[in-house]
Each structure stands twice: as structure tokens, then as C-alpha cells.
Image (cartoon, rainbow, N blue to C red):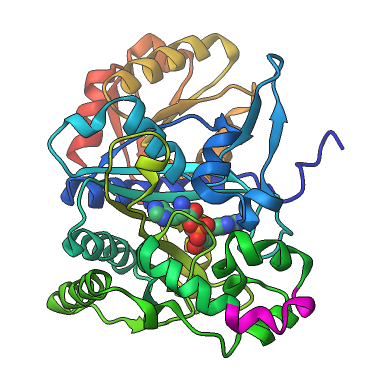
């Protein structure tokens, strides 16, 4: 137990963490170019934020949350997603008082008690973007542009954008009646979860994963055919804005999304990854959430990309992320008594911005040089009694095998390395 991480979690080891850093840096650069700023919110929130925000008829809230009582007997939940926390913070910190829209991004860990499989974890990571304050279709289009531009910049190809509109509460009311009429005769055949959703939130049944419910629902009416004029026009504008910048999409009336806060636009981006759940990005508009949580009426939209799935897509696209992790210089010592000289030089070189290293394992000089080779150090210097006495040593270019005499000072070593 002690040496096994909990099911559905994974360590990100040094051999991979530099790839995460690379992608995270690309995300930051891209967000800056879109004027989107980072927000950091707590890993846990009051449970009610998610039951009210994400919706208590969703799988996430009904089945998947990590919820516990803290020592003060408050019900706390590890965030299963980032939107509710961002909306809570937007309200609590009065971000609505700033000129709008408020454009935020986050890179977070999330927690859902799901059956682990490729691309489905219990602890996973999301890069998410939330735009608060704009009801304009240009906002919907811009967040989609951002998501797709990230994939493009990372070299992920063959993605599909599927788009739908699930309307506003008015359209939903009309539609729910039609849907319930359709489902009425098959009510007894629905799974227990869907039976309980029949009155509370019948649209959730469209998203049910049970084969029986899927079969019942396949010819059910779809919301896209019940949109009011405003919602229809909004959806048309989103499509026009996307076409305006050459983004291709497919309209898919089956997309309802698994979270309750959505209104109007919903979308998913899927990648062609064998053996993995392929929805790499999901999002949409949620015009009612901020008000529902106690804030002012604030239209909003956003998306989240699953980072683990993004890495699977990078692999499937054979995108190689290379990192130069090798030190500029390794300073070896002959005999423990010369380690202090090496240590001081390494300290000074690091202060000057050079990546340097020296022995910490009391290795022989031969073993130190073998280790320097393994680290792929670009240069090496070996310091023995003679070198300390002379105040100079040989500096070796490890790739070329060439050596030159150099004064034993960090300034001279720095100058030499910089000039090579
Ligand atoms: P979501 O569709 O639940 O939406 O999750 C977004 C993405 O997170 C998914 O497309 C998937 O890539 C990834 N994901 C979800 N669950 C897991 C899991 N168990 N393991 C690995 N990856 C997973 C949301 O979370 C919304 N908050 C998105 C949003 C933001 N909508 C508006 N703003």
C-alpha cells in the first residue's frame, strides 16, 4: 500500500515533467496573445458550489465527487472541474466591477471517482478558459479559436470540432415537455438513474451511457429543433464567426454535455486516438451560472482541455518534445580536499546563470567523468592539487574532445563557455 499510489492517479516523473512544462509554457504564451489571464483557485470548495453549479442530476455530482466532512464538520469537495470555482471567485472578488469581458485561464488538477482507463483518471489535469461578461457570439468563437490554435501550435492534427446549441431555459422548458412525451411509454425500461432524472432533468437522459437508455433515446426529439428565435440567431452567429476565420465544424444535435450549467452553445473537440476516450476538449456557454450562484446576471462561456488526453494526442501525432536538460559544465575533483574548490566554482557559475554541477557521491575521477558523460555535460574541468596550486586547469569540450587551459575563476570559465 505504502509504495503504491491510489488507483487512477499517476506520478509525473522527470522524464515527462519537462514535456508538461513545455505545453504549459505554450498555453501561457497563447493565453497572453488572447489577453487571457491566469486565475488560481483552491483545490477544494464547499460541496454545495458543485451540487448547485454543476447540477445534482449530473453523473459528476451524483456519482463521482470526492466529498468529505472536514474537522469543522463542513462538507468539502475536491474540485471535479474548474468552472464553478472560477465563477465563485468572479463573484466573491467582484471581478464583474472591472471592464468586461473578464478572460481567465487555469491549469489545475481535478478529481472524479471514475473507472480508470486510458485517458480517464481519478486525478487528472485540465487547462481551462472562462470568459465572463459577454453574450456576444464572438466570445464563443474566440474561445474555440484559442483551443484549436493551441492544438495547431502543438502539432496535433486530425481534430474534429462538433457544435450544438441547447438553447436557453425557455427553449428547454418546451423541449423537456416534448421529450417527456416521447419517453413516457418507455419510462419503465429506463435505468434507475434516468427514472429519477425524468422529472428533474429529462435532457440528462440523452447523455446516459446505459445501452438500453441509448436505444430508447436514439429517435427522441433533439433540442436544436426547439430553439427560440434569439437562440437560433445566436447559434447562427457563432457559426458565421467560426467560418469567418476558416474554422471547420460539424453540427451535432446529440451533444448535450454532462454538466447542467450550459445554455446555448456547447461543443466538443475530439482527437483520433486509438484506445483512449477521445473527447480532448469540452465547453460551451453558461449564461445562468453566475446569477444562480448569487452573483449579478453575467453571460459566460468557456472550455476545458484534458491534459492527459492532450498528451495521448501528442503521442498519437508522434510529436516529439525535446528538452536540453544537460548541464553546461561539470566540475570534477581529484580527492575530497578539492571538492570545496569545485563546489565554490559551481556556486558562482550558477549565480551567473550557467547550469553547473559537481560530485556529491564521493566518486573516483574516472567515475565522475563517466557520470558527466551520462549527464551530457557540454564542458568539464577536473581540479586536483596541481590545478589548485597553478590556479588553472584544462577545460574540455565534451562533444569535440578538445581541451584548452583556463584560469580557475568563474568569470574566465563563463567567458570561455559563452564564446564557444
Ligand atoms: P468536461 O467535459 O467534464 O467539462 O471536462 C473537460 C475535459 O476534461 C474532457 O473533455 C476531458 O478531456 C477531460 N476529462 C474529464 N474527465 C476526465 C478524467 N476522469 N480523466 C481525464 N480527463 C478527463 C468540464 O469540466 C467543464 N468545466 C468545461 C468547461 C469550462 N465548460 C465551460 N467552461
Q: Nearer the viewer, residue 200 or 144?
A: 200
The vertical placement of 268 against 70, above or below, is: below
Residue at the spot 58% in from the left edge and 16% down from the top edge: 335
**What residue do we see at 44% from left, 66% from top?**
173
Residue 79 appears in the figure: yes
Q: Residue at x 53, y 42 (%)?
A: 52
Magenta residue span: 181-190
Evaluate whether residue 122 shows in this view: no
In the rendered image, residue 230, in percent from the top left (x then y), is placed at: 22, 69
Count of numbered labels shown in the rendering? 0
Q: Main secondary structure of the magenta part?
A: helix
Q: Is residue 132 left or right of residue 125?
A: left
Q: Is residue 222 above or below residue 133?
A: below
Residue 186 is one of the magenta-drawn residues: yes
Q: Quadrant of residue 382?
A: top left
Quadrant for the C terminus, please: top left
209 with respect to 250 (left or right): right
Residues 143 and 194: in front is 194
Amino acid at each position: 500500500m505504502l509504495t503504491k499510489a491510489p488507483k487512477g492517479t499517476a506520478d509525473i516523473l522527470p522524464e515527462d515533467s519537462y514535456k508538461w512544462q513545455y505545453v504549459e509554457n505554450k498555453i501561457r504564451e497563447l493565453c497572453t496573445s488572447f489577453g487571457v489571464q491566469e486565475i488560481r483557485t483552491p483545490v477544494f470548495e464547499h460541496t454545495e458550489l458543485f451540487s448547485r453549479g454543476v447540477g445534482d442530476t449530473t453523473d459528476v455530482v451524483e456519482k463521482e465527487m470526492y466529498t468529505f466532512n472536514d474537522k469543522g464538520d463542513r462538507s468539502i469537495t475536491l474540485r471535479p472541474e474548474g468552472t464553478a470555482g472560477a465563477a465563485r471567485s468572479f463573484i466573491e472578488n467582484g471581478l464583474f466591477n472591472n471592464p468586461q469581458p473578464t478572460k481567465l485561464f487555469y491549469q489545475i488538477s481535478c478529481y472524479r471517482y471514475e473507472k480508470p482507463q486510458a485517458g480517464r483518471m481519478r486525478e487528472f489535469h485540465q487547462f481551462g478558459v472562462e470568459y465572463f461578461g459577454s453574450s456576444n457570439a464572438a466570445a464563443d468563437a474566440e474561445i474555440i479559436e484559442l483551443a484549436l490554435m493551441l492544438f495547431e501550435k502543438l502539432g496535433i492534427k486530425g481534430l474534429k470540432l462538433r457544435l450544438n446549441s441547447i438553447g436557453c431555459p425557455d427553449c428547454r422548458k418546451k423541449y423537456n415537455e416534448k421529450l417527456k412525451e416521447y419517453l413516457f411509454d418507455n419510462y419503465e425500461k429506463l435505468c434507475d438513474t434516468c427514472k429519477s432524472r425524468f422529472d428533474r432533468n429529462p435532457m440528462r437522459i440523452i447523455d446516459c451511457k446505459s445501452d438500453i437508455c441509448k436505444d430508447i433515446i436514439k429517435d427522441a426529439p433533439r433540442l436544436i429543433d426547439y430553439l427560440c428565435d434569439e437562440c437560433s440567431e445566436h447559434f447562427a452567429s457563432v457559426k458565421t464567426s467560426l467560418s469567418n476565420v476558416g474554422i471547420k465544424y460539424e453540427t451535432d444535435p446529440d451533444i448535450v454535455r454532462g454538466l447542467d450549467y450550459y445554455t446555448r452553445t456547447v461543443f466538443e473537440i475530439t482527437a483520433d486516438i486509438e484506445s483512449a476516450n477521445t473527447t480532448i476538449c469540452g465547453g460551451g456557454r453558461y449564461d445562468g451560472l453566475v446569477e444562480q450562484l448569487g452573483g449579478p446576471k453575467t453571460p459566460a462561456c468557456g472550455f476545458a482541455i484534458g491534459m492527459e488526453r492532450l498528451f495521448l494526442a501528442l503521442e498519437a501525432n508522434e510529436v516529439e518534445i525535446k528538452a536540453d536538460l544537460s548541464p553546461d559544465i561539470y566540475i570534477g575533483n581529484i580527492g575530497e580536499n578539492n571538492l570545496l574548490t569545485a563546489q565554490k566554482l559551481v556556486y558562482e557559475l550558477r549565480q551567473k546563470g550557467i547550469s553547473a554541477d559537481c560530485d556529491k557521491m564521493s566518486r573516483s575521477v574516472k567515475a565522475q567523468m563517466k557520470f558527466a558523460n551520462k549527464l551530457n555535460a557540454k564542458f568539464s574541468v577536473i581540479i586536483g592539487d596541481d590545478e589548485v596550486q597553478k590556479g588553472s586547469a584544462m577545460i574540455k569540450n565534451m562533444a569535440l574532445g578538445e581541451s584548452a587551459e583556463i584560469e580557475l575563476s568563474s568569470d574566465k570559465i563563463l567567458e570561455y563557455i559563452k564564446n564557444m
